[in-house]
Image (cartoon, grey):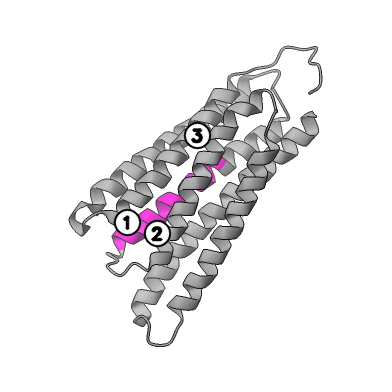
Amino acid sequence: MRLRLTPREHGFYPLFASAADHLVTGAALLAELLDADPADRREVAARLKAAEHACDEVTHSVLRMLNTSFITPFDREDIYRLASSLDDVMDAMEAAAEVFVLYDIDTVPDGIAKQVDVLRRTAAVTAAAMPRLRTMENLEEYWIEVNRLENEADQVYRHLLAELFTEGAYEVLTVLKLKEVIDDLEEAADMFEKVAHQVESIALKEA
């Protein structure tokens, strides 16, 4: 890592870690939502919405700090992109939960639980990596693992689509409802990978 000759604003690091912790909470609540009785789904979704609001607040804190800091730990544009992408992950997970409850989905293919399981594992890897931004050390294994998990998510997504569009497997309205949920979950996986790519880019610049 390069020797720093000027002071840096280090308050960004705990905020990135906090955002990632909210993603762990969001993914866990998605899993809880799938297992919940229909009568309990709105309460679980409300807790996920609260986690999404908390993640929004972290993002706003990053942006406020960015606007008031003279010296930043790395490029301002990279800070903005990383904060926004972490928030985008949570937005996609919350959107999937909202649709799941709004459409009152009662038929849940096993593949959706697999999607959520991949998100839970990716959230855990991301949360473990964020504190290491301070030193930029031992991050390569993080973005490699996220890339592997995103490939796994893609495979689950493709199999789900094949299942949905198998003639006679589901009613047309059910297909439309489920498709929206699995698309949002796939978007969350894609956004996790985007976060990892941004971390990789930052690490390479700082090397």
Q: Residue furthest left?
A: 39
Residue located at (57% from left, 63% from top): 154
C-alpha span from label 2 to label 3: 23 Å
Viewer-nearest of labels 2 and 3? 2
What span is colored magenta in the figure?
86-102
Q: Amino acid at mark 2?
A: Ala
Q: Position of residue 142 (x, y in %)?
A: 63, 40
State if disc 3 and disc 2 touch (CB < 8 Å). Answer: no
Disc 2 target residue: 113
Q: Position of residue 141 (x, y in %)?
A: 67, 40
SS for tag 3?
Answer: helix
Residue 33 shown left or right of residue 37 in the figure = right
C-alpha span from label 3 to label 1: 23 Å
Residue located at (34% from left, 60% from top): 100
C-alpha span from label 1 to label 2: 7 Å
The mark total stands at 3
State if disc 2 and disc 1 touch (CB < 8 Å). Answer: yes
Disc 1 target residue: 34
Q: Which mark is residue 25?
A: none
Q: Amino acid at mark 3?
A: Ala
> Where is the N terminus found, in terms of image quarters?
top right
- Residue 99, above or below 27: below
**Does the segment drawn in magenta span residue 90?**
yes
Q: Amino acid at mark 1?
A: Leu
Residue located at (44% from left, 69% from top): 179
Residue located at (47% from left, 59% from top): 184
The earlier-in-sequence mark between 2 and 3 is 3
**Does the segment drawn in magenta span residue 22?**
no
Disc 3 target residue: 19
